[in-house]
Amino acid sequence: MRRKLICHSVGPGVSIQDLGRSGTLAFGLSRGGAADRMAIFEGAALLGQSPEHAAIEMSGMGGVFEATEDMRIALTGAPMKADIDGTRLTWNASHLLQAGARLTLGSVIKGSYGYLHLGGGVAEPMRLGAQSAHLAAGLGGALGQGAQIAIGADRGTHTGMTLAVTSRFDGGEVRVTPSLQTAYFPRNTLDRFENTQFTRDARGNRMGVKMTSKGQGFLVEGGLVVLSEIIVPGDIQVTGDGTPFVLIAESQTTGGYPRIATVLPTDLARVAQAGVGAQIRFRFVPVEEAVEIHRRDMAEIHALPKRIQPLVRDPSTIANLSEFQLISGVTSGNIHEEEPS
């Protein structure tokens, strides 16, 4: 039998996601892919495989899954209640899911999007150069009860690894740079925008997240006559009532609302992962500083495989003790390479 992951039950926002598509913006299709791209890189590091592999993205809650063969898994992103046949699992770690065992992933403890990674990755067909479902465009769709996902051959062997990650699930400061219409907004409005504490509204999806605040909105004179032009994830549009919306993975490709700022790529996951009611404050940084922040962020991504460590557990509770890497947490020095066979 081909390696498969069976979805016995799934939440309403469970889908296959990878790093998204490039080169399709001109054709009206945004990048899409994982709402939290860092989680994809973290899962790849934990399993010692390429970040090009797709994972299962879970919005708010997961489901119950079964492997037809022994499979290595990793859990990243927003932490969820997780267990295998009743044995609790550590988040931000890799584990062995034995054939026939039930993996149960419940609701998020904090944040919005959790990720289930599979050793060998998803082996479903490509659609326009990626495996990710683009829900807004109707390209692929959410997973349903009874779905069986094909899983690729796994070259790796190690499980029981963990990775310390910087929390990005509680809101906080989000750095932004000026956008194409920032100059339309008076200086006092920009200052007020930067000094306002926003709340992540309940209204939001993979296209964008609404930000609410006390006091007057941020509508700018002439903002409603802006010509429709290119839009990218991270842009903050101000709608006709003065409410900011931060666009994320499945944003539209064009739009006519004025953009007050654009979120730095490294901070976009903090917006996407903010749970309902989380507090967010925006801070402008110069473009030069933003470039340097992005450079450091990419360096940290490439260093992830060197940061994984053995997961400390009571050996008497580990049924698959022989599967654990007990000497060293380093499985690869390059996040873009598979483990050798």
Image (cartoon, grey):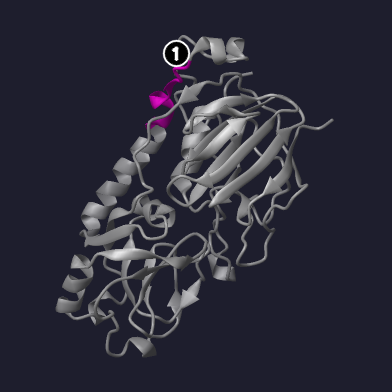
Residue linked to disc 1: 328
Looking at the picture, tell me which residue is in the foreground, 281 or 134.
Answer: 281
Q: Residue 98's x, y, as percent?
A: 69, 24
User: Residue at point 47% right, 17% down?
Assistant: 313
For the N terminus, which image quadrant?
Answer: top right
197 to the left or right of 305: left
- Does 218 appear above or below 63? below
The reply to whether residue 113 is visible in this rendering is: yes
Farthest residue to the right: give it: 1
User: Residue at point 53% right, 63% down?
Assistant: 250
Q: Is residue 21 magenta?
A: no
Q: Residue 314's x, y, as percent?
A: 49, 13
Write down the quadrant of residue 244 in the picture: bottom left
User: Residue at point 42% right, 24% down?
Assistant: 308
Farthest residue to the front: give it: 86
Part of the protein shown in magenta:
303-313
- Does 320 appear above or below 151? above
327 to the left or right of 324: left
User: Residue at point 62% right, 14% down?
Assistant: 319
Looking at the picture, tell me which residue is in the foreground, 53 or 210.
Answer: 210
Q: Residue 321's x, y, as percent?
A: 58, 11
- Does 315 appear above or below 213? above
Disc 1 marks a residue whose amino acid type is Ser
- Does 92 appear above or below 287? above
For the C terminus, which image quadrant?
Answer: top right
The reply to whether residue 50 is visible in this rendering is: no
